[in-house]
Amino acid sequence: MFLPVKKAGRIEKLPPYLFAEIDKKIREALEKGVDVIKLGIGDPDRPTPEYIIQRMQEEVTLPRNHSYPPDEGLAEFREAVSRYYQRRFGVELDPQKEVLPLIGSKEGIAHISACFVNPGDVNLVPDPGYPVYSIGTLFAGGEAHRMPLLEENSFLPDFSGIPEEMARRSRLMFLNYPNNPTGAVAEKDFFEEAVEYAKKHDIVICHDSAYLEIAFDGYRPVSFLEVSGARDCGIEFGSLSKPFNMTGWRVGYAVGSAEVLEALYRYKTNIDSGNFKAVQYAGVEALDNPKSREHIERMQQVYQERRDVVIEALKEAGCRVSAPKASFYVWAPVPYGYTSKDFVSYLLEKTGVVVTPGSGFGVYGDGYFRIALTVEVDRLKEAMDRIKGAVRF
Ligand code: MLT
C-alpha cells in the first residue's frame, strides 16, 4: 500500500500497545483451534452490578442527557467522588476544584505529561509499570527515567537511587499502589517520603490508584491523599473500571491539587468533550449506592479465592512466589533459563494459557510473568493444572 505521508517521529518510536500485541497472539491461537485460557489483560470478567446498569438504562432515555456534558463534568459526579473520598479515606475534597472526571483514568494518565513536560524534561516512571506512564511522557517530548521496582525493596522505588541530575530535570513522578503488575502495596510512610522528595525537587506526583479497592485478608490500601501535604504536590488518578467491573464504560477521575487539575482540565477541554452524561450518572450510582460496599467485598472474596488457587499451584510447581495483599495480579519469576517473552510463548504453545510477560512492563520486569485473576475458579484451576503439567520452576 502506498502511504504518501511520512509518519511523525512519535508514532515511529511508539511500540505496539502491550495488550494489543497479546490479543493478536490470542487470535492466532484461536484460529488454530487452541482452547485458550486468557490470564493476560486485567479486565474483570464479572458483569457490572445490576443497580448501576439499571441507573444507566433510566438515564439513557432522558433527553437532558443527550447533549454535551459540562466541560468540568457533572457536579453530581464530582460531588459523588468527593463523598466517596470522605467516607472511605476521611479526605475532604472541594468538588469544584479538586475533582476532575476523566474518560477512564488511562485518558488522564496519557494526557497529564502534555500539561507539564517540555521537550528535554524528564518524568520518573516505575519499572515495571503500566506502559502508559512512559508513552504519555514520550508523546510530550519528554524522557522517562526508570525507577526500578525490585523485589528486595518490596517493589517500592528507592528515591536515593535517582541521580541528582535526573531529579533536577524531572517534572512528574508516576506511582501506582496497589501496584500493577507486581501486586505490591505502599503504606503511608512511603507516600510521606515521596511527598518530601517531590517537594524538595519541585516534582508533581501522579498516583495511579486503579486497584485501591481490590485487597485481601482484610487489608485496606492507602490513598495517596491521606498523607499530609499530598494535595499540595500531586494528584491521584482513580478508576471505576476495576472496583465496579466497568472497564468498557470509560469512567474515572483525578483528585488532588487544584492547580494540577486546572492544567489537565484546560488540556482536556481542548481535545475531548467529556463523558456521556448517562455514564456519569451511572458513576454516581456506583460511588453512592450502599450496595457498592457489599459488591466490593464480594469481589474481594472472589479474587482472593482465585489468588489462593494460583499461588498454591505455582508453589506446587516449584515457583518461588508470594501471595499479593492487593490488586488482582500474581507476579512470579519465570523458570531458570527463560526470558519473560520466551516463557510466555512456551506457555501459550504448550498449554494454551495466556499470561503477560514481565518485560512488557519494562526492563526490570524481565524474568517475571503476570497472571490476571480475571477468570472463574474452575477455568483457573484448569489453567494451573495445564501449567503444572508443562513447567517445573
Ligand atoms: C492491565 O492488564 O495491565 C490493565 O488492565 C490495563 C489497563 O487497565 O488499561
Image (cartoon, rainbow, N blue to C red):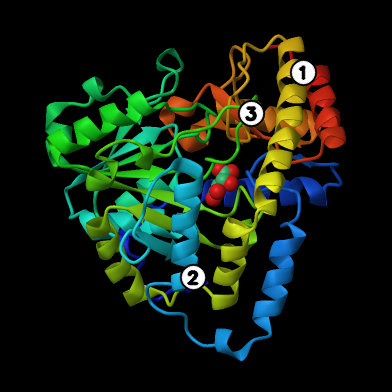
Position of residue 220 relative to residue 210, above or below, is above
How far apart marks 3 and 2 lie (CA) works out to 31 Å
Q: Residue at x 74, y 40 (%)?
A: 298
Q: Residues within 10 Å of mark 2 (few under 14, many from 20)?
A: some
* Residue type marked 3: Phe
| Mark 3 residue's CB less than 8 Å from ligand 1 | no
Q: Residue furthest bottom?
A: 63
Q: Position of residue 263 (x, y in %)?
A: 25, 63
In this picture, residue 335 sits left or right of residue 16: right
How far apart marks 1 and 2 lie (CA) works out to 46 Å
Give the quadrant of residue 249.
Answer: bottom right
Quadrant of the image for the C terminus? Answer: top right
* Residue type marked 1: Ala
Q: Secondary structure at mark 3?
A: loop
Label 1 belongs to which residue? 313
Label 3 belongs to which residue? 216
Q: Position of residue 387 (x, y in %)?
A: 78, 23
Query: Which is more N-terminal, label 3 or label 1?
Result: 3
Residue 76 disc label: 2
Query: Which is more N-terminal, label 2 or label 1?
Result: 2
Q: Residue at x 63, y 61 (%)?
A: 248
Query: Which is more N-terminal, label 2 or label 3?
Result: 2
Instruction: Mark yes or no: residue 188 visible.
Output: yes
Q: Position of residue 1 (x, y in %)?
A: 53, 72
Residue 245 disc label: none
Disc number lying in front (1 or 2): 2
